[in-house]
Amino acid sequence: MKQNWYYKLFYGMGNLGYSVVSQTITNFFMFFGTSVLKIPGSLIGFAVALSTVWDGLTDPIVGYLSDNYAFPRFGNRNGYMLIATFGISILNIFIWCVPTDLSIGLKFAWVLISLIVIETFNTLFATPYSALSSDIVNDYNDRTQIQIYKTIFFLIGMILPSVLLNLFLPSTQEFPQGQLNPHGYHKIAIFCSIVMLICGLVCVFGTLKFAKKNNNKTKEKFNLKSVFAEFFMCLKNKHLRIIILGNSLSLVSAAILTSVGMHFFTYCFNYSTFKITCTLLCLLMGMALSQPFWYKFSVKEDKKPALLSGLFTAIIGVFLIMLIFLFRSVLINSAFYLIMLSMFIIGFGSGTLYCLPSSMFMDVLSLNDSKNSKSATYSGFLTLGSNLANALALLIVGILLDAIKFNPTNFEQNRIVQTGIAVILFVGVLSSLIGSLFIFSRYRIKEKHLKQGKTN
């Protein structure tokens, strides 16, 4: 049965708050840590990677708790999300207020501890939140539609930091490249925390109807070993394995693009904050505007063809930017506009990654667990896979930035360093997109299988 639109709206708003905080960290923190705090890339990469691994490992644990232990008035999902809303709002401010005059060791310790704590709260919100969608809808196409609501708010949350980047980090006499000014990041953090607080509360109380229905009173004893043993059992299911691996690999491309993208445009093209904001907005606008298209495409042609088409479109966009970089000395007057077009193409294609894999994952779960009794636990497995992949990718990125002799104290980088940044970006993004395209091509479930109740 299709669910009322306003419940999907309340649900989607939760992703706006979560997204505006998590994506600010994902998009800007690698740059902030290396270029503003002057911490070596390998240390920042290690801190981000370790916190991401921690986030991944806690996902199935929180999922298990959410499936099995309910709050008296808030059910199995909303109580955890309520606690996390306040925790994320507070910790997000703390993480961006690292004093720049501390020693590198103290700054690294501040960053590492803050990242681990905020990732704990992120898990406490995101895992029950993902499972809540299964409690709200159970129709094949409705699953995609609620993911569209979720994705649109997620993309708005990604767009906001880019706008704030230009608003709070303008070029000044002291900081000609505004993105190097540490004080603007403090203002961005406060704004994002306010958005998280408001949207989190709207989501928690706007979907409380479904939380009450899902009040599981099981007294099953918690067993950490059995939780992770079930992860490997999950991987034995062919289609769950395909989605977990394909989703993990595809999101590595987004992590690399956002973490190295600011380095790329700052040092390879010498772009101002305004121009970087424009390129990011083109990427995000492409993602947002693509959602109705990919939804209609998936309804008409099914989900797998839509996902593969999106990945192929994103690959084309990356190749275009690679060509622009190679011929940037020739395309002096038009390079910026061509890059904006290419970023829009990448965004339009990659828009599929933020709605279809989750929808497909819910489809497979519905075939194997019709009562959704373990939806949060299994949603945690999906996030665990992507976080482990992202952690490894970001650690490698940090090490490679040091390997190419990237020096954050230099406002300009030499040609060798610029080329190294470009190679990290293009090789990382293209290899992950092409790899995920191959993995998802092996997916076989269609709408008719859901109706028949089988996965052949």
Image (tube, grey):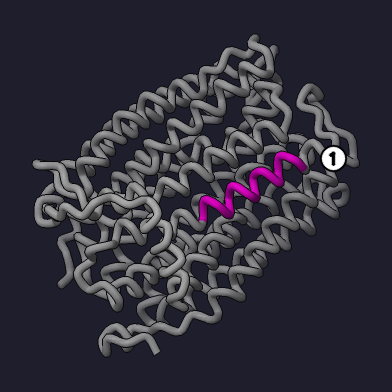
Start-end of magenta stretch:
386-399
The residue to which callout 1 is attached is 404
Residue at x 71% of width, y 38% of height: 263
Q: Is residue 293 visible?
A: no
Where is the C terminus found, in terms of image quarters?
bottom left
Is 391 magenta? The answer is: yes
Residue at x 68% of width, y 31% of height: 43
Judge by depth and name the residue closer to the eye, 449 or 313: 449
- Answer with the quarter of the image where residue 175 lies: top right
Q: Is residue 240 left or right of residue 97?
A: left
Is 158 magenta? The answer is: no
Judge by depth and name the residue closer to the eye, 76 or 170: 76
Where's residue 333, x and y in %? Answer: 78, 46
Where's residue 330, x and y in %? Answer: 87, 51
Q: Is residue 144 left or right of residue 255?
A: left
Q: In this view, does 96 lie to the left or right of 271?
A: left
> Where 311 sits versus 121, above or below?
below
Where is the N terminus found, in terms of image quarters?
bottom left
Residue at x 80% of width, y 51% of height: 423
Dot 1 amino acid type: Ile
Judge by depth and name the residue closer to the eye, 347 or 237: 237
